[in-house]
Amino acid sequence: MSNFANIGKRIIELTSCHSTNDYALDLITKSEAQAGDIVYAKNQMGGRGQKGNIWLAPKGENLTFSLILTPSFLRPAYQFELTVFISIALIRYLKSKAIEAEIKWPNDIYVEGKKIGGILIENKIKGSKLGFSIVGIGLNVNQTDFGMLNATSLQLVNHQKYSVYEELFNTFKYMNDVYDSLKRGEDIRKEYMRYLIGTDHEILFDDGEQFLSKVVNVDDFGALELDKNGIIKKYGIQDVKFVKL
Ligand code: BTN
């Protein structure tokens, strides 16, 4: 049996839907999902982002899709590895487009200080294992007007228009490569840390008080380690804000 992750072997293509993550969850609940499935919506009307935010994507301009995985080789405590995997895959994909991207902890993808992509991972735990994972990805492809948002797109960076559907296929190679590395137990953390914003310069953070720190580390469970006035503190995603990159 091939160990290849088969990401993208089956694509569920929707003209429009509320949220591809919700649609993927529905497939899982109905036992109709297979590992590697992609749920892709040309028009996502109720996209969800991190911390309960909404994710807006003008019809047909950007990539909005969800990947379904069955990472039974990972214990739930180590689910942050999925964040590491997908962040690296997107960074490598963007590199293939001559775009040098960075990761803003935990999994925002930035180019030239502006957000180009976001990730929302939702897991279904089965006993002591991760049963299913839904990896939702929003990538700005052809959008050029973001209003007040600090965001960018492939088109804005590279001054060319892309076929959104073609770019969906172009991401599969990178997702398969990195997921296979993760499954084989290879150390993908080093690459994640290499692209993380703030390991080489101080950033202004806010945990209720503002302070300057470099990113000291990200621990095995995904907590951000910062140096707050000489003391190393660990933060979850709700506990700290990036004020200035
Ligand atoms: C973020 O807040 O940065 C995460 C955004 C994730 C958006 C994607 S778009 C496809 C998938 N379906 C959703 O409802 N959300 C994710």
Image (cartoon, grey):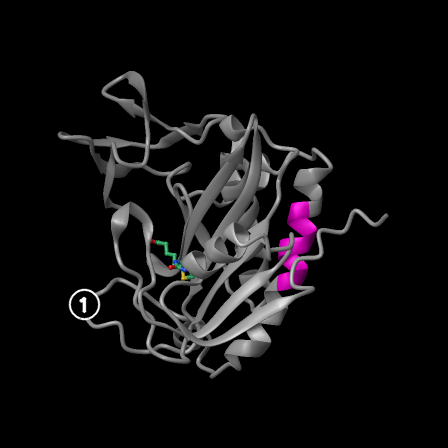
Q: On the rendering, which quadrant does ligand 1 occupy?
A: bottom left
In the picture, residue 48 is in which quadrant? bottom left
Q: Position of residue 27 (x, y in %)?
A: 53, 57
Q: Position of residue 180 (x, y in %)?
A: 71, 46
Check the image and name the residue furthest to the left: 209
Q: Is residue 238 left or right of residue 108?
A: left
In the picture, residue 114 is in which quadrant? bottom left
Compared to residue 162, the image places residue 174 above or below, namely: above
The residue under label 1 is which amino acid type? Met
Q: Secondary structure at mark 1?
A: loop
What segment carries the magenta color?
A: 172-179
* The stretch drawn in magenta includes residue 177: yes
Q: Position of residue 59 (x, y in %)?
A: 36, 79
Crowding at mark 1 (Cα within 10 Å: few <14, some 14-19, many 20+): few
In the picture, residue 196 is in which quadrant? top left
- In terms of secondary structure, what is the magenta stretch mainly? helix
- For mark 1, what is the residue? 148
Q: What's the residue at 60%, 32% (across, down)?
A: 74
